Image (tube, rainbow, N blue to C red):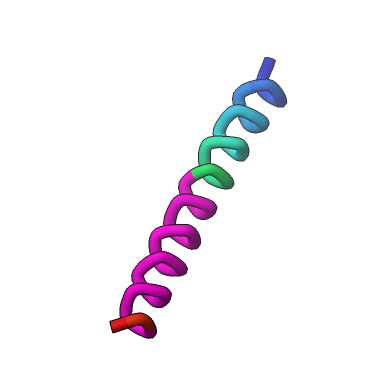
């Protein structure tokens, strides 16, 4: 049971970091275009 909770938390963390990475990438692209 503990392992399942850790996997869930880990996946949530990865999703968060991917979103941050994508947002930073989009912001950088917009700055370069302008």
On screen, residue 17 versus residue 27, left or right, reads right
- The image quadrant that residue 1 belongs to is top right
Residue 6 point in image, percent of width and height:
63, 31
- Which residue does the image show at 49% across and 62% down from the upper left? 21
- The image quadrant that residue 10 belongs to is top right
Residue 25 point in image, percent of width and height:
46, 68
- Which residue does the image show at 41% across and 65% down from the upper left? 26
Q: Which residues are magenta?
A: 16-32
Q: Residue furthest top?
A: 1
Nearer the observer, 5 or 20: 20
Query: With respect to residue 33, does 4 lie above or below?
Result: above
Q: Tell me the quarter of the image containing the C terminus.
A: bottom left
On screen, residue 16 versus residue 3, left or right, reads left
Query: With respect to residue 8, does 11 lie above or below?
Result: below
- Which residue does the image show at 58% across and 46% down from the upper left? 14
Query: With respect to residue 26, does 32 lie above or below?
Result: below
Nearer the observer, 8 or 1: 8
Q: Is residue 20 magenta?
A: yes
């Amino acid at each position: 049971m503990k392992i399942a909770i850790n996997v869930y938390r880990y996946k949530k963390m990865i999703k968060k970091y991917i979103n941050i990475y994508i947002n930073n990438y989009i912001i950088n692209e917009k700055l370069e275009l302008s």
